[in-house]
Image (cartoon, helix red, strand yellow):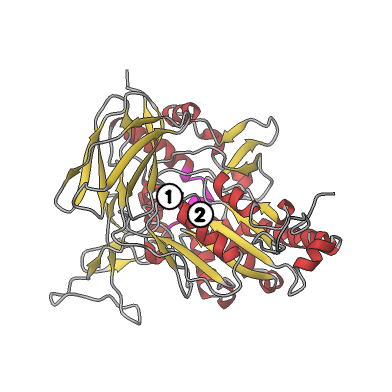
Amino acid sequence: MREAVGSIWQPGAPRSRDVTQDAVVVVPGIMGSELVDGESGRLLWGLKPAMLRRAFSRTDGLEALQVTEAEREGKGTRVRPSALLRLPAWVPLLNGIEPYHELLTMVRDTVAWPEAVLPFPYDWRLSVEHNGRLLADAARRHLEAWTATVGATPDLRALCEDRMPQLVFVAHSMGGLVTRAALGRHGDLRADTRTVITLGTPFLGSANAALMLNGGRRSGGLSGRVLDRLQALAVTLPGVHDLLPDYRCVDEGLEVSRLTPEAVAGIGGDPDLARAAMAFQLTMRSDGSAALPGHRAVVGVAQPTVQSIRVENGLVYPQHWAFKAGEHGDLKRTVHGIPQRLDRWGDGTVYRDAASGGADRPVYLPLQHGALGKGDVALRYVHGVLTEDDGYAGPPMGPGELGLDLPDECVIAGRPWRLRITGRDSPVTVTCEIVNTETEARVAGPRLSAGENDLFATVTLLQPGLYRVQAQAAETPAVTQLLLVFEREP
């Protein structure tokens, strides 16, 4: 039998690892689960960089991921989630999706036995409500199995002499919405949950979802074709419609309105999926039981983030500002009656106010959305919450957070593109490097130049591939973002 916590004798005073007795469930974000064909086992998502480029380059490259009418009607699914994402991925408008190896490793090192951890891959194509039901059942079984293991193991029973195990959810991005759906509809599960840690969860949605549904209408060339292929997939996915903004985000000049199912149809989405998603969002918003127990929200800041949109003739234009509202939801206006605009920044995908989720004390970290489940400072915070006895306020933000801004358009091998770092106006103490994610080789160290209020560099990557761009100043945590580089067009 394996040795439990504290069972190995060592000279000197007895000492145990700092662990939690709780049962931990790790819930990834959208596109953060590998998906396979249910019959053949063929990998559909979780692709190596070369396969990922081909998927976005071919007209039918993403067709296997589209949700069918039978799947929409709940008549089974031909796709099966197999694992949490193990390779970095890139999707237009999502700024890269990091794998969950570091998060899982840290959590497994923080529990009494590895069996206390449940990774929960799910079919992110389907609705949050559907996946919430599956998560509720899986979490209940996990807690019961772990409690039985504790009861049958003397050393583990000793660890739990103050209290029995409870559930802890560690949820990245959409995973926080799935967790809220699971707990909002299952009161008995809420009572058995100690805390929920969300990492960049878009509780109020993300304006990038509207851009995904608009496709490449505003773009030409390869970028437009790639965005059109993403749109052809996204319009079939209930999961993407669940991410549409649940706040007034449509700038109409003197007014700011919410998206409606008809407006979603006008920009390229599915009105029926939008209507179902909005009805579920309303339920979550109005139901008091939807508040997450012991909620700790990690919110990305200091990254340039789309916060609102403007729609003209079916084209969606991104805007990097939000609108100020008063206590009763009325818009604050200038002396000329124009709605006040304010750049609230965010994590590059979810703007900061959309990620708080009603948490009393959000923790603000200057990280990109994908890196919130990978960055060292975020992992240290999660470890602190898992092992806490008293309240933990979170790591300090430090002075002058860095932000990273990469091109929205497709990057082509051999062609120059512009990199921007915000939060500094001098390159002194600021470093930047670009690493190939497949070989981990450093391929470039861009020379930074000072702009008016930021830093910039012109970069040319000669080979196609998936790259990780990292910027860091001496006194701040590193900021990273993934970038997929395509082959030159013939």
Residue range in magenta is 234-244
Q: Position of residue 356 (x, y in %)?
A: 44, 67
Q: Is residue 418 left or right of residue 436?
A: left
Q: Are marks 2 and 1 in contact (CB under 8 Å)?
A: yes
Residue located 25% across and 69% down the image: 255
Image point (47%, 73%), residue name: 358
Q: Tell me if residue 239 is in the magenta stretch.
A: yes
The one of 297 and 310 positioned closer to us in this rendering = 297
**Residue 171 lies in quadrant:** bottom right
Q: Nearer the viewer, residue 428 or 32?
A: 428
| Left or right position of 54 against 294 | left
| Label 2 – label 1 distance at C-alpha | 8 Å
Q: Secondary structure at mark 1?
A: loop
Q: Is residue 320 positioned above or below 59 on the image?
A: below
Q: Is residue 330 left or right of residue 368?
A: left
Q: Residue at x 21, y 64 (%)?
A: 253
Q: How many marks?
A: 2
Q: Quadrant of the rendered structure where residue 41 is?
A: top right
User: Which residue in the structure is indicated by mark 2?
Assistant: 273
* Mark 2 crowd level (few <14, some 14–19, many ≥20, 10 Å Cα): many
Residue 165 placed where, x, y %? 73, 67
The amino acid type found where label 1 is placed reads Gly
Q: Rate crowding at label 1 as few (under 14), some (14 to 19) or many (20 or more) other CA atoms within 10 Å.
A: many
Magenta stretch encompasses residue 159: no
Pinpoint residue 270: horizontal percent, then vertical percent.
46, 50
**Dot 2 amino acid type:** Leu
Q: Is residue 60 above or below residue 247?
A: above
Q: Farthest residue toward the front?
A: 12
Q: Nearer the viewer, residue 357 or 418?
A: 418
Q: Label for residue 225?
A: none
Q: Is residue 471 above or below residue 255?
A: above
Q: Which mark is residue 269?
A: 1
